[in-house]
Image (cartoon, helix red, strand yellow):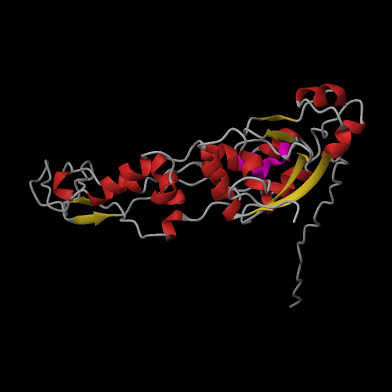
Amino acid sequence: MQRKQQKSRKGAKTLKIANTPDIISIVQLPVYLSPKATDLSLTLQSLSMAAATEVSLKLLVDVRGQRVLFEEAGKDFVDFLFNIMSMPVGTVVRLLNKEGMVGSLGKLYESIEKLSDVYMQRLQDKDALLKPKVFTSATTNLPRLLPNIESLKDSKQKCFYKCNCGCSRYIAEEPTATCPNCGRTMNIQVQIVATEKISSVTSLSSSSTSSSEGEGGFVKGVVTYMAMDDLKVKPMPTISSIALLNRFNVKDVGVLEEKTVKMGMDEAVKLLKASLQSKTVLTDVFFGNRENGLHLYE
């Protein structure tokens, strides 16, 4: 008997990375050309960053004015920014710690923590306020820039119960409830089956439409975005360098420098905090002239 061993090995597709101009070269070109819509290099990059704990950012800095004009943002950073909007207030307070929270939300959070359960409604749980959970398929491939707050303190898992008579139409939140159908105690714990999240891309085609399906995150990765100092995000504009310089009121091209920085968990938490109290977030976080900022020119 002859055994044949077949090795089905798919060769990895080699994709040419688009020659996207450096952001400093924008001021040297009459028109900035966006990356081709069919280029999938950013898609591959976003998929590889799914479990990353830091991303690389390219900043255009005004050295004389000591400010960040904007950041050439990829899909990973834009997804991170957009995900901030989906975070419950309780999650934000936990990430920043009560002491570092802006305003009075920290005190409100602390008062809920200290409030005795006897004052809460019978079917209400303080963890729903203090440790809210948000499940969305868009977070499947997000870079892990913020700490896993679930690991900071164990959360209670919500349990549901049924009776032992097979009355499948009724479930209860407490094991002392009585089944409306058979009258027996509903003390049999049931298992909750979570819905499946959107799976990651298993194959990539040359079509930008098919490649974006299952890409994860919030935005498509086939274009480059511009993140302003105040976190305003939009696709990189195809405007002349003169118009771009006039927008930032830059008179001397010589004062501009391109800086590539790494953004990890510490920087992400600082950005989250700065976004709640500042309109110059990127400058506050990455320029060394502000409190708690990083030093770009050490």
Depicted 244 relative to depicted 55: above or below: above
Q: Residue at x 62, y 32 (%)?
A: 230
Left or right: 245, with 184 as reference point? right
Nearest the camera: 15 or 227?
Answer: 227
Q: Residue at x 40, y 50 (%)?
A: 99
Nearest the camera: 137 or 109?
Answer: 109
Q: Report the number of numbered marks.
A: 0
Query: Which residue extends farthest bottom?
Result: 1
Depicted 2 relative to depicted 226: above or below: below
Q: Is residue 259 magenta?
A: no
In what quadrant of the picture does the N terminus appear?
Answer: bottom right
Query: Which residue extends farthest left?
Result: 183
Residue 147 placement (x, y as % from top left)? 51, 55
Left or right: 189, with 243 as reference point? left
Left or right: 199, with 41 as reference point? left
Q: Is residue 69 visible?
A: yes
Residue span colored magenta = 67-79
Q: Residue at x 66, y 52 (%)?
A: 294
In what quadrant of the picture does the C terminus appear?
Answer: bottom right
Nearest the camera: 19 or 147?
Answer: 147
Nearest the camera: 17 or 233?
Answer: 233
Q: Is residue 74 magenta?
A: yes
Q: Is residue 215 visible?
A: no
Depicted 180 relative to depicted 160: above or below: above
Residue 232 placement (x, y as % from top left)? 63, 30
Residue 87 placement (x, y as % from top left)? 46, 41
Residue 278 placement (x, y as % from top left)? 56, 35
Task: Quadrant for residue 214, please give it.
Answer: top right
Q: Residue at x 76, y 67 (%)?
A: 6
